[in-house]
């Protein structure tokens, strides 16, 4: 089904005159409940994963001013809390020795780390509080059953038996290298989508394999941290699987049964979007933080600026936070130009870059949010109220720790415009507000502010746009 909605000519003419097309007569009603305080918001993040060399290519091409501008767009102009990095398969092309507790790695094999080191340094220069989260995509080829970096697709390549501590040593070598160069890793996942038979770099793990391997690696890292206190053991994010549905049903229960004390953060991707997956994971995670560790829209998108992909991001974010997620991470900051919503910025190697609608919407989402806020209850009723994972009007609200600021993100994940009636109880029933909007014709645009009147605010939201309202008591 096409994502495009073809409006009649007269509506398009009215749009040019009034700034919006005719909306439904009945408003979509959004009710915000600041007293319905839910989980803590702990941050937003994004990755520099497959195209780290693209991120640094402007400087490598002698365009250092443009390189610094790009870093500003990534880490200064967008308020994020986490930067995800990839541990590649390069730094041990052959086994260094037979003792996993004694490392004899060659410094030249860590050359690929030059890019993430530069990116991490640039990020912390602009945001000293940002945390680094490293993910092992695949062990080196000699550890794999297919002797290749690829996940083997349907063959589901995995770790050779008996090499669990060698894999742990491989991870530790990366942690130590980053530490020596001033970029300590704060969080770690030992695998990326190990529940899926990938053709990209990766390795497959059954539920039983995953639980056993995780326990061995966690114990090894603690022991190495004891022996080498200059490299603290990072907090462990697990299982970092592709399917949140399968994770809730199988992987996470097994992992917590085997290693509950060693799992610091429950983390999972969001590419299997059936049902109330995050609510189930929230219950299983209990008091542990729950992270959405990777998501994007990876289908073909020919809409202007990837506005349709941006809408999917808004849909994913509202779903996750409304069902208990503490941290949400977009997949990748930078990709080469393409007709897909995998990345926020498209960079033509060493020459120029374009900020997509995904970028502008993500920036708008992140800007008013700070760790320590809490998600609060919202409901949507009316013409564009839809079930989970379906297009329509989507909203999420966040309350500051002192209760004085309320942030409401509302997205029209459909082509039609919508009249909105936003209901706000005390103490925000007569608050002033500020507003921003990203849509087909706007990028992080500041709109005229106003005042809530008797607990209601009426506005019109163009299709394929997101409105952010910040209310101050």
Image (cartoon, rainbow, N blue to C red):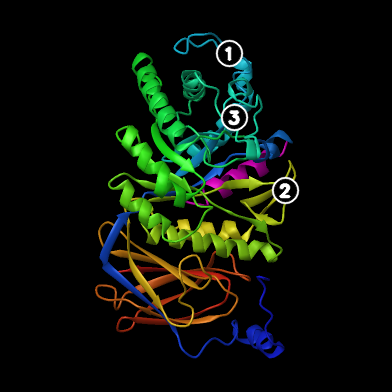
State whether residue 122 is above or below residue 242: above
Task: Kindly report the distance in space between the C-alpha atoms of the residues bearing marks 1 and 2.
Answer: 41 Å
Q: Is residue 83 visible?
A: yes
Q: Residues within 10 Å of mark 3 (few under 14, many from 20)?
A: many
Residue 78: % across, % down: 51, 52
- Residue 95 is labelled as 1
Q: Give coordinates of residue 370: x percent, y percent.
A: 38, 53
> What is the span of residues highlighted in magenta in the rendered image?
62-79
Q: Secondary structure at mark 3?
A: loop
Q: Which mark is residue 88?
A: 3
Numbered badge on residue 179: none
Q: How much space separates mark 3 and mark 2, taking CA atoms?
A: 26 Å
Indicate the secondary structure of the residue bearing disc 1.
loop
Is 73 a magenta residue?
yes
Quadrant, the N terminus: bottom right
Q: Position of residue 120 (x, y in %)?
A: 53, 35
Q: Is residue 428 left or right of residue 15?
A: left
Q: Residue drawn at (47%, 13%), measured in percent from left and top?
A: 100
Q: For the residue labelled by badge 2, is the local secondary structure a helix, a strand or a loop? A: strand
Q: Closer to us: mark 1 or mark 3?
A: 1
Q: Residue at x 60, y 76 (%)?
A: 415
Q: Earlier in the sequence, mark 1 or mark 2?
A: 1
Residue 426 on the magenta span: no
Q: Is residue 441 above or below residue 197?
A: below
Say whether disc 1 or disc 3 marks the residue closer to the N-terminus: 3
Q: Quadrant of the C terminus?
A: bottom left
Classify mark 2: residues with Cα within 10 Å, few (<14), some (14-19) or many (20+): some
The residue beneath circle 2 is 352
Question: Is any part of residue 51 visible from this angle?
Answer: no
């Amino acid at each position: 089904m096409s994502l495009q909605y073809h409006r009649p000519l007269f509506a398009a003419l009215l749009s040019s005159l009034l700034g919006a097309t005719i909306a439904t007569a009945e408003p979509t009603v959004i009710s915000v409940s600041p007293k319905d305080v839910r989980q803590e918001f702990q941050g937003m993040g994004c990755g520099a994963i497959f195209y780290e060399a693209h991120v640094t290519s402007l400087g490598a091409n002698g365009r250092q001013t443009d390189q610094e501008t790009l870093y500003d767009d990534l880490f200064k102009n967008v308020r994020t809390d986490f930067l995800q990095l990839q541990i590649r398969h390069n730094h041990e092309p052959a086994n260094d020795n037979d003792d996993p507790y004694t490392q004899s790695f060659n410094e030249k094999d860590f050359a690929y780390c030059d890019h993430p080191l530069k990116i991490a340094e640039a990020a912390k220069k602009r945001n000293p509080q940002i945390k680094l989260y490293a993910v092992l995509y695949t062990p080196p080829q000699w550890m794999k059953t297919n002797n290749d970096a690829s996940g083997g697709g349907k063959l589901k390549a995995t770790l050779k038996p008996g090499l669990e501590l060698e894999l742990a040593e491989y991870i530790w070598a990366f942690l130590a290298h980053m530490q020596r160069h001033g970029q300590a890793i704060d969080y770690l996942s030992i695998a990326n989508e190990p529940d899926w038979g990938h053709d990209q770099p990766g390795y497959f793990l059954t539920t039983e394999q995953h639980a056993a391997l995780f326990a061995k690696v966690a114990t090894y890292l603690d022991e190495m941290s004891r022996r080498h206190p200059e490299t603290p053991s990072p907090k462990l994010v697990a299982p970092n699987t592709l399917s949140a549905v399968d994770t809730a049903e199988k992987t996470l229960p097994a992992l917590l049964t085997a290693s509950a004390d060693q799992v610091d953060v429950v983390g999972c991707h969001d590419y299997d979007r059936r049902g109330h997956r995050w609510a189930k994971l929230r219950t299983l995670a209990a008091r542990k933080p729950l992270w959405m560790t990777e998501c994007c829209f990876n289908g073909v998108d020919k809409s202007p600026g990837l506005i349709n992909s941006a809408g999917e991001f808004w849909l994913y974010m509202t779903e996750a936070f409304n069902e208990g997620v503490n941290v949400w991470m977009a997949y990748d900051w930078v990709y080469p130009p393409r007709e897909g919503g995998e990345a926020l910025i498209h960079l033509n190697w060493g020459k120029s870059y374009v900020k997509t609608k995904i970028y502008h919407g993500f920036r708008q989402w992140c800007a008013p949010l700070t760790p320590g806020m809490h998600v609060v209850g919202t409901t949507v009723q009316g013409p564009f109220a839809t079930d989970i994972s379906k297009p329509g009007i989507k909203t999420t609200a966040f309350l500051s720790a002192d209760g004085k600021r309320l942030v409401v993100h509302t997205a029209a994940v459909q082509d039609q415009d919508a009249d909105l009636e936003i209901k706000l109880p005390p103490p925000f029933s007569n608050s002033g507000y500020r507003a921003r909007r990203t849509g087909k014709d706007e990028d992080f645009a500041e709109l005229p502010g106003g005042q809530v009147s008797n607990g209601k605010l009426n506005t019109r939201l163009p299709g394929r746009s997101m409105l952010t309202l910040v209310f101050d008591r």
